[in-house]
Amino acid sequence: MNRISVFARRQRIKNLENWTIYAIAAEAFLLAIFPQAAAAAVLFGIVAWFLRLQIDKKFKIRSLPFDVPVTIFVMLGAVSVFMSPAQSFELIYNYFGIVGIFILTYLLVGQNIRTAEQIKTLAQSMAAAAIIVVAVGFFQYIFGVDTSEMHWTDFENFHGMQTRIFSTFENPNVLAGYLDVMICLALGFLAKFGTLKQKLILIAAILLLTICLTMTYSRGAFLSIAIIFLIYGILYEGRILLLFVIGTAILFHNDTTFLERILSIFTETNDPSEGLRIGIWVSTISMIADHPFIGIGWGAYQFIYPQYNYYLIDATQTIYHAHNLFLQTAAEVGIAGALAYFWYFFGTMFMALALNSNERYEKMKNAAGEIVHRATESKFKKKFDEEFAKTVVESKFLQSLAQVKSMFIIRMGELTNKIFDRFSTQETKPTKKKSEPELVHHDEMKWDAKTKKPKDKKTDEKSDDDNIDIQKFAATVELFEDKKNVADRQITESMRLGIGLAFLSMALNGMSDDLLFNIPSSILMWILGAAAAAIDEINNNLDE
């Protein structure tokens, strides 16, 4: 009965663990497609996590690198809402509803992702969502979409710009920021994955994402990703930068409207979009000067801006955000709250972009090549059954580590039995009566599995090939485990680099547009930030 109870308890713990990871994957997938369902996935995951904490005593809450600034930001954000001059219940409702989802996402991802395989699941979910977003974008561009009534069309200044796609997002600029993030994640995997097939798939994905990005005609996002490609080309792969330059040249040649739009940033002095942004920035700086400590209240920008509307002719137009991430944050939660927020934001970015100089990681990378050599050259390979050898050579062991360990136990058990038999069975001198059979205890009798008869003692003698070198075996098992660590490290390092580049792209985009004003994009940022913290913990465990 006790065994049944223990088994059932372990099964419940495993189910709850799976449910939390499924909830995280569902949130990452649904954010860009169905945000309301993504919020429901978060709540489901939090319930599953709470239940697991009650049942699994070994599963503990852990501290993450940037828990302190996150806590400070949340507390100061709450103070700014209650002290806001807007004095609106809607602010309180939005704060606890939206910031609540941010923090629940941070906790769900940061506390429950603890293996490289789970990081891989998260990456696959975001990749699947990106495929749908890009497909919808291409559909809009090919078949057309009516955007004439939307304020961001800008057709009057750029007559050749017939369509600006927005896919599943609310406007092209938000879509462009999302595509920048996905391109950065793909670049992270491209830098770390080594096979030609993987690289070709990633290059194709980056190409499609970039083409979709150009269909948004978003200037800030395109310039941001151009800087990302420049940094990536200098630090990692110059050929990717060359491909980007060639592709951009072809794009500018075929689409002169896009070229005019990019150049307008540097040449046009009467661009209404630029004039609007500058006017909003000046007004936002006045807000910060008047409310430097606790800000105007998180989410209160649209209510307070009319009091600072110094430059807009149409006073009835609602301005929802400052078109600048840094000014927006400082205005709403105050300078102290903004410092805490950017401590988390840039701290995550620098942590993710930190170069890996770990000696063990280099050792594991070298071991990945050595394992194949040892497996093919050593004598004990003859005793390694075909399944195990095939697993090593073809790298299928990455999905069957538990099987390898069990095979190791079986081999060690066979070796122990042979050693025990050799030293426990004494050789007897041949008697004069050769015809009389030698008396052997039934426990010591060797049976032939095919004939179901006792084996002849002579045929049971060991050959040189049967003598397993235990030291070589142990060395191969150690290298085997190192190669598994290499595969795990490949996933975590790829994701970590991609997250670092993604945060850099969000910071660059934030200079001219507040991508994180969009709720799905903000939640995505919290997912990636928590994932970076989880990766830091995973890598520390791999180093031990």
Image (tube, grey):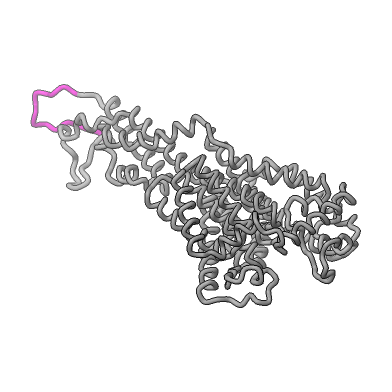
Residue 147 in sight = yes
Q: Position of residue 24 (x, y in %)?
A: 60, 57
The quarter holding residue 182 reads: bottom right
Q: Is residue 260 left or right of residue 385?
A: right
Magenta-colored span: 428-441
Q: Is residue 250 left or right of residue 443?
A: right
Using the image, determine if residue 60 lies above or below residue 24.
above
The quarter holding residue 380 reads: top left
Determine if the magenta segment contains residue 138.
no
Q: Nearer the viewer, residue 459 or 430?
A: 459
The total number of labels drawn is: 0
What secondary structure is the stretch in magenta mostly built from? Answer: loop
Q: Nearer the viewer, residue 407 or 413?
A: 407
Q: Position of residue 138 (x, y in %)?
A: 51, 69
Q: Nearer the viewer, residue 160 or 333?
A: 160
Q: Position of residue 261 (x, y in %)?
A: 61, 62
Q: Quadrant of the image for the C terminus?
A: top right
Q: Is residue 25 left or right of residue 77?
A: left
Using the image, determine if residue 55 lies above or below residue 215.
above
Residue 27 in sight = no
Q: Position of residue 432 (x, y in %)?
A: 9, 23
Determine if the magenta segment contains residue 430.
yes
Residue at point 63% right, 44% down? 349
Residue at point 50% right, 73% down? 142
